Structure formats: C-alpha cells, structure tokens
Amino acid sequence: MRRCSSGDNTEFLKIEFDDSVHKHSGVLYRVPLGNINRVGFKNHRVDSSGILIQELVDRRHRFVVVKPVLSTNNPKAQDTVVVVEKLEPLCAGGGWDAGDYSNFPDAPDAAVARHAPAAFDEVFVALWVVEAADERPNHGGGSVDSLGYERSASGWVRFELVVSIDNWFEGFVLLVGLSVIVRFRRDRERERERDEGRRMDLMEKNLELIEVQKLEGHTDRVWNAAWNPVSPILASCSGDNSTVLEETHTRTVRSCSWSPSGKLLATASFDGTTAIWEDLGDEFECISTLEGHENEVKSVSWNASGSYLATCSRDKSVWIWEVLGGNEYDCASVLNGHTQDVKMVLWHPTLDVLFSCSYDNTIKVWWSEDDDGDYQCVQTLDESTNGHSSTVWAISFNAAGDKMVTCSDDLTLKIWGADISMMHSGEGYAPWTHLCTLSGYHDRTIFSTHWSSDDIIASGAGDDAIGLFVDSKQHDPVNGPSYNLLLKKEKAHEMDINSVQWSPSKESRLLASASDDGMVKIWQLETTP
Amino acid sequence: MVSGLINENPTVYERKERRVRTDSTNTDEFSVEPIDQLEIFDHIRDIRDPEHPYSLEQLKVLTEDSVEVDDHKSYVRVTFTPTVEHCSMATIIGLSVRVKLMRSLPPRYKIDIRVAPGSHATEAALNKQLNDKERVAAALENPNLVEMVDECLSPSFE
C-alpha cells in the first residue's frame, strides 16, 4: 500500500492485489479504517446474454455524503466498526479486456469482516482506493486502470457510491482491487437484540466449543497466545524461538502482549530481556530491548493508554517502564515485595493500577496514590484474605474492571471485586475482596484464565481441558455472586494448556488456546443446532 | 575422592534382579500394553546419583514402589528418598527423574515428582519447585544444570 499523488495534487493510496490481504477470506486486514478514505469505481457486469457492459457510476445519483460525520483522520475512526447500511452488488475484477469477472458478492475476493462495535452513532467512512494493481485476482495482465476511472484533464476523478446489500451485516467490506463507498452506522437496535439473544443462549446451555482452526508451526511448546486488539492477528510465543525472535532473544519467549494501539508487540524472555517489536506489515522489527531483570522475565503488560509497560521476573521484582517517544523506554520503578518468582503482571483495564501474581501464592496490587510515578504495594491478597494456597499463575479483569479472576496451582479459580467507581472519582484506594471460589473443575494446575467482554470466564489447565464459566445471576445477599460451569472441553489439546485468550471481536465468540503440544487452536462458542 | 560430598558414605544396596517379562496370554501383536509400574521403574532405576557412582536403585533412592502409575489416566507419580535429610542434590535427582520420564513416556503422561514425606528438611519447597513446569523449563535451559542432569542420565540410556 503506498501513497501516490495525482496530477491535481490529491493524495491517494494504491492498493496492490495481495497487499495485506488475508489469503482465505480476502479481507484487507492490515489497513486500519482510518487510513481508508475514499473509493470510487466502475461497474462491470455481464448481462443475461453474456455481453459485458461497462457502466460508469453515475455521480449524480450516487454522491450521497458530502461531508464525513467523522473524518478519517480522527483517531477514533481507527477502531470504529460499523454496520454496512447499504451495499450494492457489483462486479469485481474485470478490465478493459474480456476476461473473468464475477458478481459481487460472488467474487472470491470479496469478504465481509467483523469487528467489535464502536462507540459512535454514525460514522461515515469512505474508502479511498485509487486504483487496483495490475494483478487482479482472476487473472493477471490487463490494464492498470481496471477500475475504469474517468480521467479528467487534471487527473483522476473519483466517484462516490453508496452500496446496498440485502442482509444486515456488522463490519466493513473490503474488496481486493475494487473500490466501494460504504455508509456505516452503528446499529443499536440490532446490538440490543444481539445482547439479549446472547444472554438467552448462554442460559439455554446447549452450547459447544467448536474447533475452527488449528495453527501448527511451532516446534516446541507454545506458552502464550495474544490477539491483536485492532486487527485479526494472533501472536504466539514458544520455546522454539522462531527465526526473527532468535536474533533478539537467546532463550524461550515466555509471553507476548500487544500495545493498545495494536502497533507494537512486547515479548518477555527467559534470557532476562523484554523486546519491543513494531509491526511493519510483512515483518516485525525489534525497536527496543529492555534489560534489567536478573533472570527470566515471565510476563509483560501495557497499561490502557499505552504509556506504561510492566514486566516481572523470577528475580521476585516487578518493573514499570515509561514509554517515551522515539522508541525510548525508561525504567520508572522497581517494585520489590514478592518473596518468590512473579508469574504474571497485568495493568487494570481503566486505571493505572498494576497487579502481579506469584509463586509466593499472593496477588499484589501496586498504585501510585499521588500519581507521581511512585508506586507502592497497596494490597496483598493472600491466604488470610481467602486467597490461593499455592502458586497463582494468572489474572484477568472483566470489561468493566470491577471484577477479576485469578487461577492457581491450588486447582481453583477465584473471583474478586472492588468498588472502582471510588477510585475513578479520586476517593482513594478501593480494596479488592474475595467474592467466590470455583473448585473441583480442574484436577491439575490451572495455568491461564481470561474474562471475555461478554462475561464468560475461560480457564486452561494442565488437565488438557478448557473450562468456561458464567455468573449464575443468583443474587445471594450472604454469599455474594456465584458462577456456574457453562461447559468443560476435555482433551482440548493433547498436553497442558498454557494460555487461553478470547478474541477482542465481539461478533463471534472466538477463543485461542496454546499448549505444550506445540499447537494453537482457535475455538468458537456456538449454540448447537 | 572429591571431598565435601553431602553424603560421604552412602549405603549401597544390591540391585534387584531384573524380571524378564513373558506374557503368553496376549498373542495379539497390535494390542498396546498398558504401561505399568515396572516399565516406568525400568526407565529410572539406573539413573546415576549426582555424587556417587551408583544408581538411584542401588542407593535405594528409588524402588519399584516409588512409582505409582495409572496408565488409563496417563498419570505417574514418583516418590524418591534422598539418602540424607539435607541433601542439596535432591533437586538434581528430581530433575533427572523428570527429564528421563519426559523423554521415555508418551506425551499424554502427567508426571508428578516428590520426595518421600518426612525424608527432607525442605520437603514442601522442594516438591513445589520440582512440579512447577515453568521453573523446570527454565532450569533445563541452564547449561550447568543440563550438564549435571545428562551425567546422571547417561548410564540409564545404555
């Protein structure tokens, strides 16, 4: 994808045929919506007698939106996902030459992708495509301007078009080598129905976890898998130290974490360093290496705004790093307090409060009261406060950030809650209290747990099984909330499961699991027909 | 002799006579035999003690009864008895047993290693460390430890 200029000094993007296009779905996935401005095209179709008809899009009828509701250089447009309001079937491909063309939506290279809904009521995102590359999906060769732009004296003239489709979709449409203007709006009604529908289907209990994809390629155990927050990419790390990482990390990469913008990936390694990688499209470049821990780094976490990173290690310490500009990272704080190996660190989803869990069986909460970067341990959750009786391996928060789940070698999961509205309003630290313990579901160490955005808790354990839990919604004033097992997927893998993580996508309930058997599997939670 | 050994004079026992297996009842060449106690013990009995030129069996660190196996559940637990209570070589012994089993048993197996209750001063801490797979993995990336473990394992592969 590159920026070009036309004769009249307007900028446009040239999209190559397989530029960031996913092989199977045809979705252009590495282009954030904000980079897509405007698109225009020409309709090619074959009529019933098989004659190719080339129609120029009639501007007068098609020009619908004069001015974007949300301009595309607004950073919020980056992670907006939208409803396609109208999408007209059009021919894909084709050119001035006779050749193959197909009708959208039959085009093999058209696909609808799905994302999480956005927070805006109405967003107009126009897709800039300037021209398709020479290599069209159906055949190579042909002229460059397969889109049939009308060339004016001063340069290209672009058309705007509103496209319509019969069914409701949530997502954005990206076509290879084609251009389309789509009008989007957030479909609140459908969202309400969907959320209702989801709550209903969770109750019905005829749910299954179906394996949708198996990713093989690692030659050693896979410790961790992490979904990119903005695009459908999954990062996984392994003891096998795949080629790119080998040059930076000299030992096992234990965990990885994407920055909130999805542009950077941090990897934590047994070699004592944490590396920061930038996604350059077809490869990752190591832009910085954080050193300081005395031995194996176990986990790394970005705070919600991406301004801080935290790492933890077998050296019992937790380090906080400040993200400065220009690929610079500075150690802001070294936090001592744990008496053993620290297994995981995690920033709270909305507040700059840091959580760590350890081989010393405790969970510690670190906070800088005066917001001056001076972090202290403000709470320790141990056996005396209904905490775990063995190594705590992982922590995860619900979307609201007022509950968290922790899992342990003691074979239990524990749910904790806090009144974080107090913290948001600056009334001081709100302590975490134990709400519920889930035991008897796994008979080997529970290595990982993750709380989905629609309130399903997943667990992955050494018994090769994945557990899913939901709030029973029975409000017991004495005992507090309780959670039920939604389902247990036995033998999800052939060996220990080291990591489970829900995809940020809200449309489908996708779960990634990583195992000692060297595989990463992607599961979908569905109602059985 | 190297001085400063944890246990200068270990008691050495006779090796148990190896039983030859004959199973005339099962003539189906395609059936898979369940893995039993003896088979697993055979994998680990010849592991050498880190300090002495004797096997763990000879030093009675391991016996056939050290092995508790349930093949159906793919589970094995090995309980070993260090020769002295303050044995600091216990970690190496435990690691060696684990590595040998990891290499010899099918990947479906879950392996627990522990010291015999009451046989070591820091029993709980030792057991916890031997069964934390992240710690085991990190330890096995330490070239010094790997060398010691390989030393202990070499005779058992003969």
Image (cartoon, coloured by chain):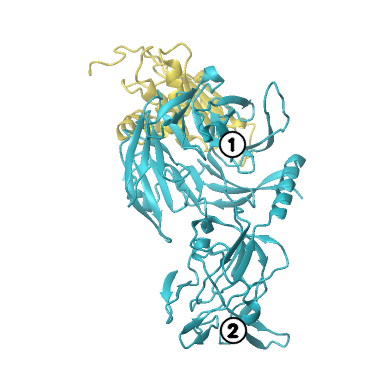
- Chain bearing tag 2 is A
Q: Amino acid at mark 1?
A: Ser
Badge 1: few (under 14), some or many (20 or more) residues near its Cα, within 10 Å? many
Residue A471 occupies which quadrant of the picture?
top right
Position in image of residue A135 (x %, y %): 50, 77
Residue assigned mark 2 = A99
Q: Amino acid at mark 2?
A: Gly
Q: Residue at x 53, y 17 (%)?
A: A384
Image check: A203 left or right of A138? Answer: right
Viewer-side residue, A517 vs A440:
A440
Q: Real-space Cα distance between discs 1 and 2?
A: 52 Å
Relative vertical location of residue A510 with respect to residue A159 in this rendering, above or below: above
Q: Residue at x 59, y 30 (%)?
A: B71
Residue B80 occupies which quadrant of the picture?
top left
Image check: A498 left or right of A60? Answer: left
What shade has chain A been given? cyan
Position in image of residue B59 (x %, y %): 39, 16
Position in image of residue A259 (x %, y %): 45, 48
Badge 2: few (under 14), some or many (20 or more) residues near its Cα, within 10 Å? some
Viewer-side residue, B153 vs A36:
A36
